[in-house]
Amino acid sequence: MTEADYADFLVVGGGTCGCVVAARLSEDPSATVMLLESGSGYRSALELPDVLGDPYRLPVGPASEYTWTYPVELTPRRASTIARGRTLGGSGAVNGAYFTRATRADFENWPSSWGYDDVLPYFKKSETDRDFEGEFHGTAGPIPVERRAWDQLHPLSGEFQAAALAAGFPDDVDKNAPDSFGVGRVPLNVADHRRISTAIGYLMPALHRPNLRVQSGINVIRIVFSGTRAIGVDVLDDGNVRRIRADHVIVCSGAVATPHILLNSGVGPAEQLAEQGVSVILDRPGVGQNFVDHPEVLLPYRFSTPRTIRSQTPVLETALNLAELEIRPYTASFTDLVPGVPRMDHGVGVVLMAPRSRGSIELASGDPAGAPRIRYNYVASTHDRAAIREGMQIAENLLESIAETGLIDRPVVEYTDEWIESRLGTSLHMSGSCVMGAESDPFAVVDDRCRVIGAQGLSIVDTSILPTIPTRGPHATAVMVAERASAILLGDE
């Protein structure tokens, strides 16, 4: 075995969390760290492709070289596809740069060791907030956080803010405050008109370290075990299978790929594995179950007069956050934001942020290279359907108020199941497919130290372990989890 085939810490997946974990673990000069990324890589921020640095476009369309695409079933009657980042920085390198934290209340159903007071230091450690200081904000972290200046807001964003305030919703001055509620500007991980992913903020500054190696274009086939101890991974490299050994394997491949890798490795529901001819290493019924995402219905709007697309305008500048709903006034059509998608109207997103319906990620075949079967089971619960309709009514009322200014035409909204389902999509906020919980919980996959229950030398650090989906986009929360998990792995906590 050569030095290139071994590491103390082997990080599988160079996405949002993997970049943080690799950078933080390599701060210990006595530890060797290897990061494996299936997509593209680069050696410095100067090599960053323009499309990955532009926060005002989303390179997630069907022809993008920076995403994986998966077929999914949103409901039994509605099929779709989803995109996940396929480059260093992962989905955080191709998204709309929305960087809002989970709220204090979101942590009430997490393990007691992950309360808001426990995680706040890691939220602060991750960021440099350019607008706020004080006990809730960081001033020296790798990720810059800023909000769009009031005098630079897109007209729709400004009118949405005014309409929501006029309707009596609270002024949410700081959406990264612990008890954020109401309408206000969205925090963005943007600096000098550049999207700052964790690849740029965390990984690139660490690449000079001799104990850190990054390999891109490497597909992990399976985790390798000796009994129930993870001892490395098998990877596909230029068509050849190669084994890389490690003292500790940390899977950071995201809420879709992480359970898929575990299932292909023999960790998951024993009956499902046996059906696909996969030898069972560890029977963990929760792998791939409890999968959840934020369902979103897009209400169309049209400007009263044609408008030129403004360059350097964020996708989302303001939002209205209620107990379990988020209303998002997108500043442009996704046709203009995502290269290669069909013609679409401009839209306001009505998003259910605390859905009760749960989906699953399962093996579709015993072929590790095949796509998993992803079923969302959206709006299966009566509660979810009623909550989405409530959000649609709020959004329609706000659009009616904006139409009175002459900026947009009066909206046309229907409330039938067919109309809603035809406009149903996903926020691409996948979570919960390998949840954190008590060892006594048969559906928990990792404990509160991010260790796979029943295995040794194996951890998971990404949004798959979130016990409940945050009522905000998960990007900032994912970075926090990676920060804290790194401290745990290094024995600092």
Image: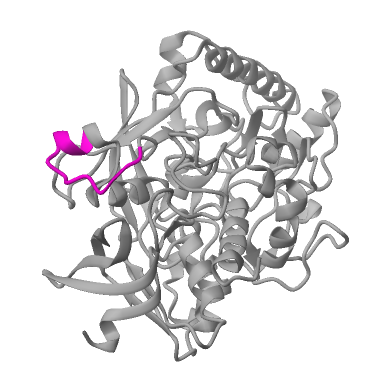
Q: Nearer the viewer, residue 1 or 319?
A: 1
Which of the 4 image quarters holds residue 149? bottom right
Residue at (84, 45) in percent of width and height: 173
Whether residue 121 is in magenta: the answer is no
Q: Is residue 462 left or right of residue 404?
A: left
Residue at (65, 28) in percent of width and height: 325
Q: Which span is picked out in magenta?
A: 272-284
Q: Is residue 450 left or right of residue 242?
A: right
Q: Please, is residue 164 above or below residue 107 in the view? A: above
- Image coordinates of residue 75 in percent, x first then y, are 36, 21
Q: Is residue 446 left or right of residue 169?
A: left
Q: Please, is residue 13 above or below residue 25 in the view? A: above
- Image coordinates of residue 229 in percent, x first then y, are 33, 61
- Image coordinates of residue 383 in percent, x first then y, are 57, 14
Question: Residue 98, can we see it?
Answer: no
Question: Residue 103, can we see it?
Answer: yes
